[in-house]
Amino acid sequence: MEENRVAIMILQNERQYLAARPEFGYLEPLERAIEQVWLTTLQRGVDEGDFRPGLDVGLAYRFIRDMLFTTARRYNSGRAESRTDSAQVAETCRSMILYGLLR
């Protein structure tokens, strides 16, 4: 998030514009490749019993992707009022994904 925050935000905000430009033609295949890694990993987790049976891996992927994009948008290590470093943000997000809001 710290190294690529602006790039993530530009991709989010300007995705349609970038997709129409030939010099950014590499983005679509790259996004599909990243998505495939996530889908394969999530499905393997279901198959091996690490994740719950019947998990909608496509929906889980989109949830994780969107949560990460939102985190990149909200997190700004340069803000004086920011009291959380990137490791804490990552740990909180990981915990929410794995354990939800359970005590």
Image (cartoon, rainbow, N blue to C red):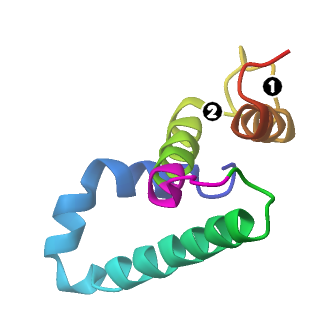
Amino acid type of the residue that numbered disc 1 sits on in the rendered structure: Thr
List the residue tagged with mark 1: 84
Q: Position of residue 65 (x, y in %)?
A: 52, 52
Query: Of the numbered discs in the image, which one, if any, rests on residue 32?
Result: none
Please report the bounds of the magenta region as a residue range: 53-61
Image x and y of residue 83, in percent: 80, 19
Residue 39 located left or right of residue 94: left
Q: Quadrant of the C terminus?
A: top right
Spot the residue most to the left. 20
Secondary structure beneath dot 2 equals: loop
Q: Which residue was labeled with disc 2? A: 75
The residue positioned 17% from the left and 77% from the top of the image is 21
Q: Is residue 57 magenta?
A: yes
Asked if residue 19 lies left or right of residue 69, the reply is left
Q: Is residue 96 left or right of residue 25?
A: right
Position of residue 69 measured from the top left corner of the image (x, y, whole percent): 51, 45
The residue at the point 55 percent across, 30 percent down is 74
Amino acid bearing label 2: Tyr
| The quadrant where residue 95 appears | top right
Label 1 secondary element: loop
Residue sitting at 50 percent across and 44 percent down? 63
Please state the horizontal and vertical placement of residue 98, each as a whole percent of the image: 76, 40
The answer to whether mark 2 and mark 1 are in CB contact below 8 A is yes
Decide: is 39 above or below 58: below
